[in-house]
Amino acid sequence: RTVFVNGEYLPETDAKISIFDRGFLMADGVYEVTSVLGGKLIDFDGHLKRLERSLNELDMEKPSEFDDLLEIHRKLVELNGIEEGMIYLQVTRGAPGDRDFVFPDPAETRPTLVLFTQNKPGLADSPAAQKGIKVISIEDIRWGRRDIKTVQLLYPSMGKMMAKKAGCDDAWLVEEGKVTEGTSNNAYIVKDGKIITRALSNDILHGITRAAVLRFAREAQMEVVERSFTIEEAQQADEAFVTSASTFVMPVVEIDGAEIGEGAVGPVAKRLREIYLDESLKAAV
Ligand code: PMP
């Protein structure tokens, strides 16, 4: 694989980052994942805007290559021959010469920029999307700025492991009795034709896929209600699903052992997945 590190395209085995990098020592970094379909980037503008917002919220400098990011994404897709897959991008506050809680002076440290591709043939035609996934619920004990897409992914990672141990695929996070989101996706239920998902706040990541799916749903005259819901309400819903850049619209057929609806992929999730794939492919760059 050819990867991009601080201005250079290199074989992955030659890519190097300092041991003092604040991403490595302190999870002082932000990231984006953009999917690739038909060799093109899905929702690139949305990801770039959110990256800029994450950097701003953390007072982090933009990498000097910021304005060239589309070109860098495209070049990596081409160099690695990616038809379907993802591009991972990470920016950290850089690598000062030592470990220190205080942010380094931006005049002395430049941000670290890393990008790499992940080849995933069959991403759009995923067998999981035909079958639906099973989730468990766990307490949401993450920090309070989940709207910033930081690389602090230890708890989400533990959540996936708890799900795996329980024979499930993923976990939904619950705070004060209400679902916030999935470990790496936004969460939805469908009841009497209404699509229900938590409103945007600092409590959840402002999903790029969420924004697109809600827009397409409204354009298709489907009713969208942005409000919180409990696990009990979700278990009695007609359908449930999650969205993310790497899974698009993914049906959820079981929550904490309770089947949702018929326990199979429902019509709303199926239709939204089709619309999302169609429309975002048309707009892909
Ligand atoms: N919530 C969390 C916690 C996530 O990690 C992600 C994906 N990284 C999402 C939601 C979905 O966001 P997007 O649609 O932009 O991938």
Image (tube, rainbow, N blue to C red):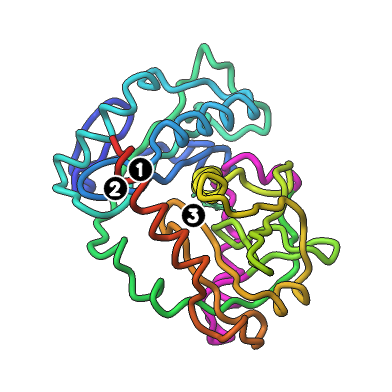
Q: Is residue 102 left or right of residue 150?
A: right
Q: Residue at x 50, y 44 (%)?
A: 212
Kind of element beneath mark 2: strand
Q: Is mark 3 within 8 Å of ligand 1?
A: yes
Chain-order first, disc 2 or disc 3: 2
Vertical order, 171 against 21 (above or below): below
Please report the bounds of the magenta region as a residue range.
144-171
Q: Is residue 250 magenta?
A: no
Distance between the alpha carbons at the discs numbered 2 and 3:
13 Å
Query: What percent of the width, then of the height, locates residue 4?
Result: 27, 36
Query: What percent of the width, then of the height, locates residue 237?
Result: 68, 74
147 or 14, nearer to the observer: 147
Residue 42's disc number? 1
Q: Which residue is mark 2?
A: 36
Q: Which residue is mark 3?
A: 244
Image quadrant assignment for residue 79: top left
The answer to the question of whether label 1 and label 2 lie on touching residues, with beta carbons closer than 8 A, is: yes
Answer few, some or many: residues within 10 Å of disc 1's Cα (few below 14, many 20 plus, some between 14 and 19).
many
Q: Is mark 2 within 8 Å of ligand 1?
A: no
Q: Is residue 51 left or right of residue 247?
A: right
The quadrant in which the C terminus is found is top left
